[in-house]
C-alpha cells in the first residue's frame, strides 16, 4: 500500500488543545487527503489509543515522548520531524519546531506519497538540511513589488512555508509609496518604499507627531495582517529595515542638537537628508522605545535585518557614506586620522546593534539582529571583532571586504566576477569555513545569500525562470560547508502566478533529503507535472534553458537586476541619439525612471550618475558572446516546448514554461541590444577613421532593427499569453515596477525607434553639467 492510500483510511486527526496555528493548518490540509476524517482536540493529557488515528504536533505536545525527543534533537540539531503510518491510516507527524511543521507535512504528501507504508510503520526521522531560512528583500510580499497584480498573499506565505522557509519579512507599507517628499525632479523619495524603517510603524516620545497617526496605523495594521498569515503557516515574523534612516527636517527643528550624519546620495537627491545622531543616549532611547513598541504589538517578532549606508540611511563617520565621513558632534573631532575615525565609527555601529538587540530581548530573549558588512569596508576590523551573541552577519561571501573584491567567477567566462548573490555564484569556497566557525564561536552567525528565482537578483522583472541544477549546486555546496542560516534574495515566485517553480521544488526536497540525486528528482517532478508522455521534453528544455543562462555574460550587474526596471530598458527606445527624441515624447518612460534630469544615463546607457557601468570593449565582447553561445540554446529550449505543447495542448506546464522562456529570450535580446548600443554609439564617437565609423553605425542600425523585431514579439507575448511572466503592478506604475500600460509603452518605443533609426550616433559630453545648470521648477 502506498502512503497516500493509507491516508484514505485515516478516521481521526488528533491535535492538542492550545496548539500553534500551524498545527491546525496542517490538520485541516491533511483532512483533504482523507475520506472525511474528523479533527479532534485532545485536552485531557492522554494519548487515545484508537485505530485509524493520526496525530499531529510539535515537540512540546504531550504525545511526543520526552526522552526520545531529547535524544533526537541531539542527533538532528538543525531540527527534524518524525513520521510513521500504518495501513489503517494511523500514525504521527511530530515536528521538533514550529517553523518546520508545514514544510514537513508538504514533504510527506509531495515527495513520500508513492512510497510503501512498510517504510514508515516503525517511524522515521527526517533532519532539516538548514537550521534557519529567511527571505531577504521579499520583492513581492513586502518590498517594491508588493503591488503585484493578481497575487494571492496567503498563497505566497503558504508557498514560503511549503518550500522550507522559517522566517518572513512583515514590515510592508500599506501604500504603494512611502510618505516622503522632495523637490520636483528628485528621485530620492522612491527609495523609502522598501526596507521600511521602524518609524514608519510606531513612534516614540521623541518623534511623536512627525508622521501622521493614520499613516502609522495603516502601516502597523498591514504589518499585523502579515504576521497573522505568518503564524498560520508557522513562520517567524521579522523586520528588514534601512537604519538609522534619515528623519524629516521638522524633527530637527524640534531637536536641532540631535542632527547626525548626512546620508543621501548627492546625485540622486536635491536636498540633504540627515539621520539622528545615534551617539546621543536620547536617540538610542528613541530606538529602544520603537523596537519595544513593535514587539509589544507582535511579541513573536524574531529578528531584524538592518541594511545601511544606502536608501536614506547610514552610520555616522563611516567611510562609505555617500558624502564621506561625517556626523554629529559627539563621536570624534573631524581632523583625527582615518584609523581613529574608523575605530569610533565601528564602535558606534556595534553600540547601536546592541541597543536594538538588548531592547528587543527584554520581550523576546531569542531576538537576533542581522547586519551586512559591505558598507563597513573602512570599519570592518572593528565591527568584525565586536560581533557577539545574536548579532549576526549577512553576506554573499566572507572572503571579501567591501563591494568589489568578490573571489568568485562566472561558470563560463572567467573574466566576469560581478556575480555576487546571483545564480552564477553557484558554490561556496571552502575557505569560507574558517570565518563561519569564528562567528559561531562568538554566538554570532552568517546568513549566506542565495538567489533562486525571486525576481530581484537576476532577470528582473521576469517571474519563474528555471535553473534547477545551478540551484542544487549552490545549496549542496552550502550544506557541505556547514552553513546553517540562509537568506533567500528576492523571496520566491508567487506560487499562484508561477505554479511550476522547479528551482523551489528542488530546494524543497533538499531541505529533508540532502542526499537526493538531482537528475532523478528533476525527472520525478517533471513527470508529476507533465505526465509520462512528455516529461522528458520538459526536462530537456530546462537543460537547454540553463545552458543559455550559463552562456549569458554579465556586462553590468545593475542591468541584470532591479536596474533593468529602474532604467526602463524594456520600454525606452534604443536610438543613435536619445536626446534627439523630444522631451515630450520621452515622458512616457522618463517620468517613471529612477533617474534625475541630469543623470547621464538618460542619454548614455554606459553610465549612471558618476559610475561608468561598462566599457565599449566589454559591451562588444558581450554582443559577441551572446551571439555565439546563447541563442541556439534558448531557441532549442523553446522549440522543444512548442513542439511538445502542440502535440499535448492540454498540458499547461508545457505552455507555462514555453511562455516564460520566450520572455527570457526577449529579455536576453534587449540586454544584448543595450550592449550593442553602447558598443556602436561609443565606438562611432571614439572612432578615428571613416571605415570604423561606418562599421559602428552599421552595428547601431542592426541593433535597432533587432530591437524593433524583438519588441514586436514581446508585444505579441504580452497581448496573447495566459501566463503572468513578469512583475506588473495592479495599482499603478512606480520606478520599482511596471504598470498595466506596459504593452502601449512598447508600441511607443517601436514608433520612436523607426522615426530616429537613421540619425548620427551622438552623446552630449556636457549633458550632466548642461542639465544641472537649467532653471528647474
Image (tube, grey):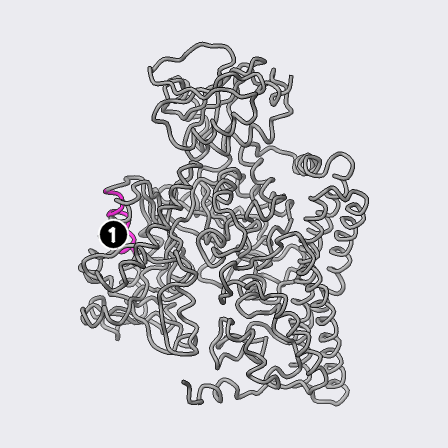
Q: Residue at x 58, y 35 (%)?
A: 509
Picture quadrant of residue 624? bottom right
Q: Main secondary structure of the magenta part?
A: helix
In the picture shown, does residue 723 fall above or below 44? below
**Is 727 on the left-hand or right-hand side of 713?**
left
Residue 19 spot, x, y in % from top left: 37, 27
Q: Secondary structure at mark 1?
A: helix
Residue 601 spot, x, y in % from top left: 54, 77
Residue 710 spot, x, y in % from top left: 72, 67
Task: Pick the residue in front: 428 or 748.
Answer: 748
Q: Residue at x 60, y 40 (%)?
A: 506
Residue 706 spot, x, y in % from top left: 74, 71
Q: Is residue 200 magenta?
A: no
Picture quadrant of residue 118? top right
Q: Residue at x 70, y 47 (%)?
A: 542
Magenta stretch: give its range: 350-362
Q: Is residue 352 magenta?
A: yes
Residue 398 shows in this picture: no
The residue to which callout 1 is attached is 355
**Is 81 on the left-hand or right-hand side of 754?**
left
Picture quadrant of residue 662? bottom right
In which quadrant of the rendered image does the C terminus lie? bottom left
Amino acid at each position: 500500500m502506498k502512503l497516500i492510500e493509507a491516508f484514505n483510511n485515516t478516521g481521526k486527526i488528533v491535535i492538542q488543545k492550545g496548539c500553534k496555528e500551524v498545527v491546525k493548518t496542517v490538520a485541516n490540509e491533511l483532512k483533504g487527503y482523507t475520506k472525511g476524517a474528523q479533527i479532534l482536540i485532545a485536552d485531557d493529557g492522554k494519548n487515545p489509543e484508537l485505530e485509524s488515528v493520526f496525530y499531529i504536533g510539535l515537540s512540546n505536545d504531550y504525545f511526543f515522548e520526552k526522552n526520545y525527543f531529547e535524544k533526537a534533537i541531539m542527533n538532528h540539531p538543525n531540527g527534524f520531524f518524525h513520521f510513521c503510518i500504518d495501513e489503517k491510516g494511523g500514525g504521527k507527524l511530530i515536528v521538533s519546531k514550529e517553523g518546520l511543521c508545514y514544510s514537513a507535512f508538504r514533504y510527506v504528501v509531495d515527495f513520500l506519497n508513492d512510497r510503501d507504508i512498510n517504510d514508515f510503520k516503525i517511524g522515521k526521522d527526517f533532519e532539516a538540511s538548514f537550521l534557519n531560512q529567511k527571505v531577504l528583500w521579499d520583492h513581492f510580499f513586502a518590498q517594491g513589488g508588493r503591488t503585484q497584480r493578481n497575487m494571492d498573499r496567503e498563497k505566497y506565505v503558504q508557498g514560503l512555508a511549503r518550500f522550507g522557509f522559517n522566517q518572513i519579512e512583515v514590515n510592508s507599507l500599506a501604500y504603494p509609496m512611502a510618505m516622503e517628499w522632495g523637490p520636483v525632479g528628485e528621485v530620492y523619495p522612491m527609495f523609502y518604499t522598501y526596507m521600511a524603517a521602524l518609524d514608519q510603524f510606531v513612534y516614540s516620545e521623541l518623534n511623536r507627531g512627525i508622521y501622521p497617526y493614520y499613516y502609522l496605523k495603516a502601516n502597523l495594521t498591514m504589518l499585523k495582517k502579515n504576521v497573522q498569515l505568518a503564524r498560520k503557516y508557522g513562520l517567524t515574523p521579522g523586520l528588514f529595515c534601512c537604519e538609522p534612516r534619515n528623519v524629516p527636517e521638522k524633527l530637527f527643528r524640534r531637536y536641532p542638537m540631535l542632527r547626525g550624519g548626512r546620508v543621501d546620495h548627492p546625485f540622486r537627491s536635491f536636498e540633504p537628508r540627515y539621520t539622528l545622531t545615534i551617539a546621543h543616549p536620547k536617540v538610542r532611547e528613541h530606538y529602544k522605545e520603537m523596537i519595544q513598541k513593535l514587539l509589544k504589538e507582535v511579541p513573536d517578532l524574531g529578528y531584524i535585518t538592518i541594511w545601511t549606508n544606502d536608501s536614506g540611511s547610514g552610520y555616522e563617520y563611516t567611510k562609505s557614506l555617500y558624502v564621506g565621513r561625517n556626523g554629529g558632534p559627539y563621536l570624534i573631532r573631524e581632523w583625527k586620522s582615518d584609523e581613529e575615525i574608523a575605530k569610533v565609527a565601528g564602535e558606534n555601529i556595534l553600540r547601536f546593534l546592541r541597543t536594538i538587540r538588548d531592547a528587543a530581548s527584554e520581550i523576546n530573549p531569542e531576538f537576533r539582529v542581522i547586519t551586512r558588512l559591505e558598507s563597513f569596508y573602512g570599519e570592518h576590523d572593528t565591527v568584525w571583532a565586536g560581533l557577539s551573541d545574536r548579532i549576526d552577519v549577512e553576506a554573499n561571501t566572507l572572503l571579501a571586504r567591501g563591494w568589489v573584491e568578490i573571489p568568485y567567477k562566472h561558470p563560463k567566462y572567467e573574466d566576469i566576477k560581478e556575480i555576487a548573490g546571483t545564480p552564477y555564484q553557484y558554490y561556496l569556497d571552502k575557505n569560507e569555513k574558517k570565518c563561519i566557525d569564528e562567528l559561531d564561536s562568538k554566538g554570532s552567525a552568517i546568513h549566506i545569500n542565495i538567489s533562486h528565482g525571486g525576481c530581484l537578483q537576476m532577470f528582473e522583472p521576469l517571474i519563474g525562470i528555471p535553473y534547477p541544477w545551478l540551484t542544487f549546486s549552490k545549496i549542496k555546496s552550502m550544506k557541505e560547508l556547514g552553513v546553517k542560516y540562509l537568506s533567500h534574495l528576492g523571496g520566491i515566485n508567487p506560487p499562484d502566478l508561477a505554479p511550476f517553480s522547479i528551482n523551489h521544488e528542488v530546494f524543497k526536497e533538499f531541505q529533508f533529503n540532502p542526499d537526493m540525486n538531482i537528475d532523478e528528482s528533476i525527472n520525478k517532478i517533471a513527470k508529476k507535472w507533465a505526465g509520462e508522455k512528455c516529461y522528458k521534453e520538459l526536462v530537456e528544455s530546462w537543460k537547454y534553458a540553463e545552458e543559455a543562462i550559463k552562456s549569458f555574460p554579465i556586462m553590468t550587474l545593475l542591468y541584470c537586476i532591479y536596474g533593468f526596471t529602474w532604467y526602463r530598458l524594456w520600454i525606452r527606445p534604443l536610438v543613435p541619439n536619445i536626446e534627439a527624441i523630444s522631451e515630450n515624447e520621452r515622458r512616457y518612460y522618463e517620468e517613471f525612471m529612477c533617474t534625475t534630469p541630469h543623470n547621464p544615463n538618460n542619454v548614455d546607457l554606459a553610465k549612471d550618475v558618476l559610475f561608468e557601468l561598462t566599457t565599449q570593449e566589454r559591451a562588444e565582447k558581450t554582443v559577441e558572446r551572446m551571439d555565439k553561445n546563447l541563442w541556439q540554446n534558448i531557441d532549442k529550449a523553446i522549440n522543444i516546448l512548442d513542439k511538445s505543447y502542440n502535440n499535448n495542448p492540454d498540458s499547461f506546464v508545457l505552455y507555462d514554461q514555453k511562455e516564460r522562456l520566450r520572455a527570457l529570450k526577449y529579455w536576453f535580446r534587449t540586454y544584448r541590444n543595450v550592449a550593442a548600443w553602447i558598443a556602436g554609439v561609443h565606438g562611432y564617437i571614439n572612432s578615428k577613421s571613416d571605415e570604423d565609423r561606418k562599421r559602428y553605425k552599421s552595428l547601431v542600425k542592426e541593433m535597432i532593427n533587432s530591437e524593433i523585431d524583438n519588441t514586436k514579439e514581446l508585444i505579441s507575448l504580452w497581448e496573447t499569453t495566459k501566463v503572468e511572466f513578469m512583475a506588473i503592478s495592479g495599482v499603478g506604475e512606480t520606478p520599482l515596477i511596471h504598470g498595466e500600460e506596459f504593452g502601449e509603452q512598447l508600441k511607443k518605443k517601436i514608433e520612436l525607434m523607426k522615426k530616429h533609426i537613421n540619425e548620427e550616433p551622438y552623446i552630449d559630453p556636457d549633458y550632466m553639467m548642461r542639465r544641472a545648470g537649467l532653471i528647474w521648477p
